Image: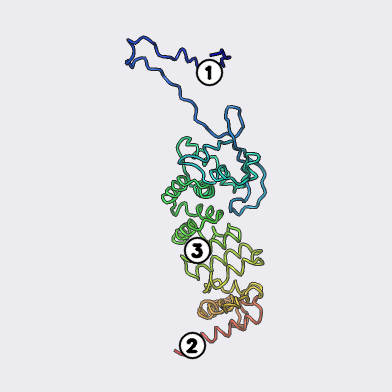
Amino acid sequence: MSARKKLKLSVDYEALDFDTDLAQVGETSGNILLEEDEPLSWSLSDVPGNLSDWTIVVTEGGGLGGTCAGTSTSASHYHVHKNILAVGPRKSEYFSHLFLSTTSFVESNNSRSTIELEPSAAAAFPIMLDYVYNIGNLELSTEHAIALRHLSKYFGIHKLFVEVANFIRRDLTAETATFYLKEASLYCDDKVLRVTCRICAANAETVNLKRFLVSFDSEQFLLISSFLKLFVSSEIMSTYVAEYFRSHKEATKNPCFNDLTNNKIIPRIDSSEAIFFLSLPMTKVLSSNESTHEPSLQNRCIASCSKNWKSVLADPIKAHASDSLQLPGSAPLPEIGQLCPLVQVKLLQSALCAADAVLAK
């Protein structure tokens, strides 16, 4: 065999070799001690010893089905290994299909994937990579649970999805429900939304649900309302909707107004909020679904007031007249007085008919 230049290695293998004295063969006292090598890991910098062959660029925005506006301000570069991502019990089906596909993807040309994530998912992305690389124990928390659930579904990491789902089952309580509700609405996670809405509805006073709901944008509130209505009465739902528009007056001009006040969300209006809805612009209150002949918001509000004519109209009018030292009816309630004359007439006509029906009994 021809002589070859010998590379300098980090270990002196001659010194590590066992003694050739056959008298020591079979003894255990002189076992060679092995040093543990560091496991293969992803890195935020492309260091020479990392031997990474793929880069994942994560930017913060509204990607992967999120709702955040796509205004990325920074990016994180994760240098990873294709064989770790695509093979093994913790593999990502997303990357496995990408690496094994015979189709030419743009990402394959430069060995790079660029992914836009919601801020909470971007923060949880290193935790997902640690899990795939099997680095340390998976430390789950309320803060990252929904984001990891979202990432595990998108990237197809089945074992992570199961572990996160089991954690959420244990962790989802009245104390954590509002946080889960906010995160689930961000990722449009219908299954978690349904459960969290049920818990929040059952603990509405404890979690101060009415005030909490006004923190959402109109699209998220509409999504939440589509589940919340399953667990509260229409009257209670109408108080949530009224409080939302009272806090977001500009939202009454958006298309979401009709979606949130239609007959499917609030078929019956709580009498305490009927006057508020009636005070809104007529074009909004009169809107109705002509294709299904659903009653307009105005008609539903008037029906609620007439049904509760004594508490909504008669008693407040008498109290107001007493306070202002005037005859009942000569000084209408400020709230009613602000309604357009046509609505006032309809309201009083309906209330008189309801009162007459009571007196006739």
Which residue is more in the foreground, 186 or 65? 65
Figure quadrant of the C terminus: bottom left
Which residue is more in the foreground, 39 or 140? 39
Q: Amino acid at mark 3?
A: Leu
Residue annotated with mark 1? 10
Residue annotated with mark 3? 228
The secondary element bearing badge 3 is classed as helix
Whether 72 is drawn above or below 18: the answer is below
Q: Amino acid at mark 1?
A: Ser
Q: Residue at x 33, y 11 (%)?
A: 24
- Viewer-side label of 2, 1: 1
Q: Earlier in the sequence, mark 3 or mark 1?
A: 1
Whether 224 is drawn above or below 20: the answer is below
- Viewer-side label of 2, 3: 3
Q: Residue at x 55, y 59 (%)?
A: 213
Which residue is more in the foreground, 284 or 306? 284
Q: Earlier in the sequence, mark 2 or mark 3?
A: 3
* CA gap, disc 2 and disc 3: 35 Å
The secondary element bearing badge 2 is classed as helix
